[in-house]
Every structure is written in structure tokens, then in C-alpha cells.
Image: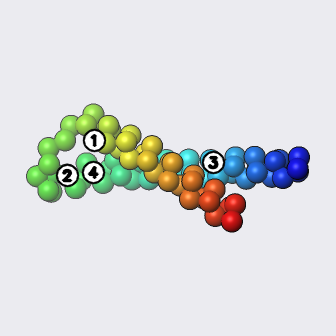
Amino acid sequence: MKKKLQNLFSGGRISVIEAATQVLAGTVLIFLSNMLVFPLLGIEATTSANAFLVAINTVVAFAKSYFVRAFFRNM
């Protein structure tokens, strides 16, 4: 039982690190792409509005990445 709990914690830690790395890379890319694409679509968004949208997407992406990874790890 103790070994199983240790494996679960270790795997969970790796899942958090992997999800955070993926989300950080995605955050930077989505911020830059928003700054390029929004004007092409006629959307006027300030840098702070763009950062707010990116922050919301970052939280959602992190949760999705973590839970999908945890789901497959525990199958």
C-alpha cells in the first residue's frame, strides 16, 4: 500500500511538471499569436486584455493537461 501511494505521488509530481511545461510554452505562443491575429480579424484588444484572456486559457489548459495525463496514468 505504501509503495503504491509513493508511486502515485511520484507520478502525480511528474504530471504536474509536464503539464506546467506544456502550458507555459502554450501561454507564450497563444499570447504572441493573439497579438498578431486579433488585428487581422479586426479585434482591438489591449495588451492587458490579451493577457487576461491568456491567463484564463492557461488555467483551463493546465487543468486539462493534468487530468488527462492522470487519467491515462491510472488506467
* Residue carrying label 2: 38
Label 1 secondary element: helix
Circles 1 and 2: CB atoms closer than 8 Å: yes
* Residue carrying label 1: 50
Left or right of 16, for residue 49 = left
Location of residue 15 in the rendering, given as x and y in whole percent from the top left corner: 64, 52
- The Cα–Cα distance between marks 4 and 1, rounded to whole angstroms, is 7 Å
- The Cα–Cα distance between marks 2 and 3, rounded to whole angstroms, is 31 Å
Q: Residue at x 53, y 55 (%)?
A: 65
Residue 70 visible in the picture:
yes
Looking at the rendering, in which quadrant would you find the C terminus? bottom right
Circles 3 and 4: CB atoms closer than 8 Å: no
* Residue carrying label 3: 17
Which of the two residues, 39 or 9, is positioned nearer the viewer here?
A: 9
Q: Nearer the viewer, mark 3 or mark 4?
A: 3
Q: Residues within 10 Å of mark 1 (few under 14, many from 20)?
A: some
Mark sitting earlier along the chain (4/1): 4
Q: Most extreme residue toward the front, as rendered?
A: 1
Label 3 secondary element: helix
* Kind of residue at disc 3: Ile
Q: Residue at x 34, y 47 (%)?
A: 31
Circles 2 and 3: CB atoms closer than 8 Å: no
Q: Residue at x 32, y 38 (%)?
A: 51
Location of residue 68 in the rendering, given as x and y in whole percent from the top left corner: 56, 59
* Kind of residue at disc 1: Asn
- The Cα–Cα distance between marks 1 and 2, rounded to whole angstroms, is 9 Å
- Residue 34: numbered disc: 4
Label 4 secondary element: helix
- Residue 18: numbered disc: none
